[in-house]
Image (cartoon, helix red, strand yellow):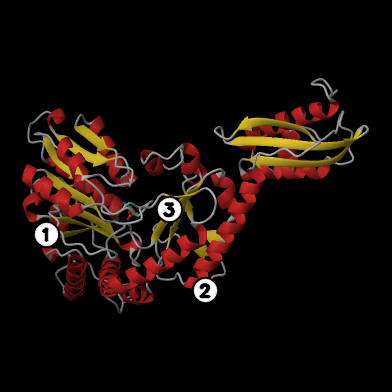
Amino acid sequence: MSIAGPIYLDYAATTPVDPRVAACMAECLGAEGVFGNPASTHAYGRVARSRVEAARAQVAALIGARAGDVIFTSGATEADNLAILGLVRGMRAGRAPQELHVISSRTEHKAVLDPCRQLEREGFAVTLLTPAPGGCVTPEQLREALRPGTVLVSLMHANNETGAIQDIAAFGALCRAHGAAFHVDAAQSAGKLPIDVAAMGVDLLSFTAHKLYGPKGIGALYVHPARRVSVLPLMFGGGHERGLRSGTLPVHQIAGFGLACELAAADMGAESARLARLRERLWEGIGSLPGVLANSPAAHCLPGILNVSFSGIEGESLLFGLAELALASGSACNSDSDEPSYVLRALGRDRESAQSALRFSLGRGTNAAAIDRAVAAVRREVLRLQALAQDEPGQGEASGEAGTREQGTWVRFMLKTSGESIAAASHQAYGCPQTLAVCEWLVAQLPGRPWRNPALGGPLEWVRTLDIPADRLTRLLVVEDALRAALAAAGGSPKARR
Ligand SMILES: *Cc1c(COP(=O)(O)O)cnc(C)c1O
């Protein structure tokens, strides 16, 4: 890595563009390059068109498809939307929407769940299956959910949070037998696991370049030729991509995607084996920590993903303490919602362990030294936060506590007094980084001050002194309550303070 930043362990979120891919893309940009519009009939257009078609063949080869059955989109999100909204709306054919039924699962990516929700708003019937504890929908669950009106089943190949790999071929066989169309979100698995749309009985398959060392902003949807007539486009324009996705083709993106697919296919076996060894090294390093819980399945998991929770640790503080690692977490602060990972919640994890989940995702730039540094950092932080949150008041100390772990904040202060003044202060805490920072600051300020009135102010002053975002104020009320209780205990009476 050329930038001196944190160790990148977030390859499931996106990957850097392979330098060979970047060079290939650059060729398609300037006046000397293949910059023409592939729809133009002159020589520039023809050259661009042949570049697009060569890339289409490379992309199709990765999933065992014919080139003509691959449609370029802006990414997997658009491909998922086109597959789900396009197919179901297209199959309506005069029927009332509630007669058409769609099956998907609670642990799908938002790019699948949100179009399913949209279909529900439009009146279509949608069933979301809850995967078995290992994280996979079972073929039996799918068989039971299929009903006469089921027109589409959408189930992902590998999960983006846990890495769990589902039995696509079994789902495909059930859908074929039933006559339902089968869509697969393969954004995480394409280029990492072998895919053969024909052998797996897949009708529609979405994937994206930026998860396999290609550029962002380009992806593909495979559509089985027999299903193509049923898919309504989401965009209307020049009728590009068999009328399913209008818009001038981005030749540089497509050429880069094509090469990225070819490189991924050539490297797949060796790279998977290498990543699996590194993941094993990571698990050996952190799996023995107290309270560790693997959210990734032991078998049938992407080689590059390991998702773990740490019980008794607040997720935001853990991530805050791991600033030298670039990681995804299940913590709500990592997303735009208040809820920790809905995927882990759907797998039966409680709020607290979903909140403390870390997703390590490894890739081409990851080596053993990076794993060893990550292991050392995680061990250090987990042990530190566990020690801080452990629940054992010392002997001969006045202690007071407030809050609960379930609510996300718990604090206990312990004070030793000498006459009228505080001789020593310590604390135990479970909470966000700001809560911990305020506690630390308070125990540094308390010694030497009178326990009757240490004059350290309250949450409003602490927020200002320590430059804390105002939305943390309610958590600091817990700190104040715990401090009050400890000061009261120091005075031997609840009214001791003032
Ligand atoms: C990344 C991802 C997507 C979205 O892909 P984009 O190309 O970024 O739109 C969809 N599904 C899964 C499972 C993903 O991992």
* Tag 3 secondary structure: strand
Q: Which of disc 2 and disc 1 is earlier in sequence? A: 2
Q: Residue at left 56%, top 43%?
A: 312
* CA neighbours of label 2 inside 10 A, class few (<14), some (14 to 19), many (20+): few
Q: Residue 185 appears at what percent x and percent y?
A: 25, 52
Q: As displayed, is residue 310 above or below residue 31?
A: above
- Please report the residue visible at 15 percent of the width from the left and 40 percent of the height from the top: 143
Q: Residue furthest front?
A: 395
Front-lying residue, 438 or 387: 387
Q: From the top left corner, tell me how far across and down residue 212 is, in percent.
A: 33, 65
- In-front residue for pair 229/295: 295
Q: Earlier in the sequence, mark 2 or mark 3?
A: 2
Front residue of 115/47: it is 115
Q: Is residue 474 left or right of residue 426?
A: left
**Rendered location of residue 224, percent (x, y):** 11, 55
Q: Is residue 420 left or right of residue 50?
A: right
Would you say residue 245 is visible in this rendering? no
In the rendered structure, which amino acid carries the disc numbered 2?
A: Ser
**Residue linked to disc 2:** 2
What amino acid is labelled 1 in the image?
A: Ala
Disc assigned to residue 307: 3
Single out the mark in the foreground, 1 or 3: 3
Measured in 3D between alpha carbons, the distance from the residue under mark 1 to the one under mark 3, in whole angstroms, is 31 Å
Callout in the foreground (1, 2): 1
In this image, 190 relative to 380: left or right? left
Q: Which image quarter is the C terminus in?
A: top right
Q: Position of residue 243 (x, y in %)?
A: 14, 53
Element marked by disc 2: loop
| Amino acid under disc 3 | Asn
Report the side of 335 relative to 205 (left or right): right
The disc placed on residue 180 is none
